Image: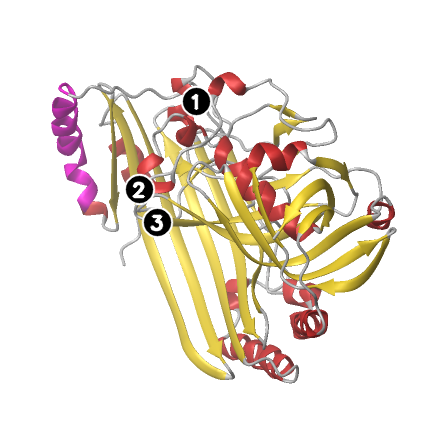
Amino acid sequence: MEQIDIDTVRKTLHSIGEYAEARIESTSVQEYSMKNGVLLGAASYESNGVGVRFLQKGSLGFYSATNPANLSSLSHRVSAMAQRSLTSSESYKLSQEEAYNAKYSVIQKEPVQNVSPEQCIELLKTIDANLASEKVSSRFLSLELEYIEKTFVNSSGSEIKSAIPRISFHYLFTSENSQRFWQKGACEGFEVFKKWKLDEAIPLEAREIAKANQNAEHVAGKFDLVVSPEIAGIIAHESCGHPYEADRILGREAAQAGESFLKLKMRGTRFSNDCVSVIDDPTVKGSFGYFEFDDEGTRAKPKKLIDHGKINTLLSDRINAAAINEKSSGNSRAASFDREPLIRMSNTFFEPGTKSEQELFESVKNGVYIRRFMEWNIDDMRYNQKYTGCEAYKIENGKLTAPVSNPTIEITTPQLYSSIVDIANNLEFHAASCGKGEPMQGMPVYMGGPSLVIKGVNLK
């Protein structure tokens, strides 16, 4: 595949539209999957290309190419699109943002682009063999190593280069009375597996879940809950991160991913107790959702979606920020060069408190602790939601006692956040692949938080 030359792209940008930007990307990927000890697939591939977005007479256009020769006809396409846009009822604008000249990368001790297929397959075999010893009925493992070199340029003078390695590991196992699907992920080198110790951690997880479900009893009624960082993370992602995306609020993403219960007029109003703050921060080092600049060239920064109980910052890109007369939050991301950037989360999490998890347990007289979950559901408005645990325990007079079978929370977002009364200091991050758009774009993110006390929740 022919390489895309940056000078060719820069020349093209200055020949089209009132504004133009380009993402030149080179990506190498290795993928492996195994089921019950049998290798299902092993693949490696590379892709190179450029995605160009432009604004002309209020018309916003996007074009991608893998061949530099295809860029030569782009100015003619822009002129034709601009002419058609004169009859359109909608005219786009972009927020005014600073131009940057920058370069950043992730330091790797064991570069993912140098890892051999034999190393990857051996890793899967070891984890599978250890998991099989726990007598789970079905096991599925998958591993993906990715290395992306990207150059962003625009007609405003920005030039931003980045080199990001990304590792993703999925596992699914099924036992007699439970199923567990989870993911690990990071922007680090292959050395991260030494830190994760998955050959020990995943079998231990299977053992703990099986033990908890052997004699678990069903409970129903109103309880005070303590939820682990894992549960806090999925709550932050699904019922705070998504509804705070400005394109959902403005109705521009409704057909592809849904809308939001949140309205612009709600900003600044109280939504939860003062102890609750939720942050989205792309700059967390090593995180699965790490970046220093988004795919519109805007500098990434931490921002508080909920600030001490009040609705605060929205997630935005340049298009939707301009629609509400604001600056972009720096959350515009695309899954590859041939996809338009959309508003996406990065690393979304509850801000930790000061108490230990044990102190949270001690504050509860009659409750349930949900340590791991099995499934979740949430509606298109991110208002009604459901979470089902796969490992949970009773809390009686401040102590964990008997295991509980698959406790299920069904609650609205306002009820949930207004019921959070205490937050621990045991912040954890968990990787996820977040889907949005048409065609679908899966983006790497972290979701996280510390343990939470949620008061007076009905369990089913």
| Of callouts 3 and 1, the N-terminal one | 1
Residue 10, compared with residue 356, is above or below; it is: above
Q: Provide the residue designation for mark 1.
A: 321
The vertical placement of 375 against 174, above or below, is above
Closer to us: 378 or 144: 378
Q: How far is disc 3 from disc 1 in space, using C-alphas?
A: 23 Å
Depth check, front residue: 55 or 68:
55
Segment tinted magenta in the rendering = 70-87
The reply to whether residue 434 is visible in this rendering is yes
The residue singled out by tag 2 in the image is 51
- Tell me the amino acid under the disc marked 2: Gly
Structural distance between the alpha carbons of marks 2 and 1: 22 Å
On residue 440, which mark appears?
A: 3
| CB under 8 Å between discs 3 and 2 | no
> Does residue 338 appear left or right of residue 231 in this picture?
left
Q: Which mark is residue 235?
A: none
Mark 2: few, some, or many residues within 10 Å (few <14, many ≥20)? Answer: many
Image point (33%, 53%), residue name: 48
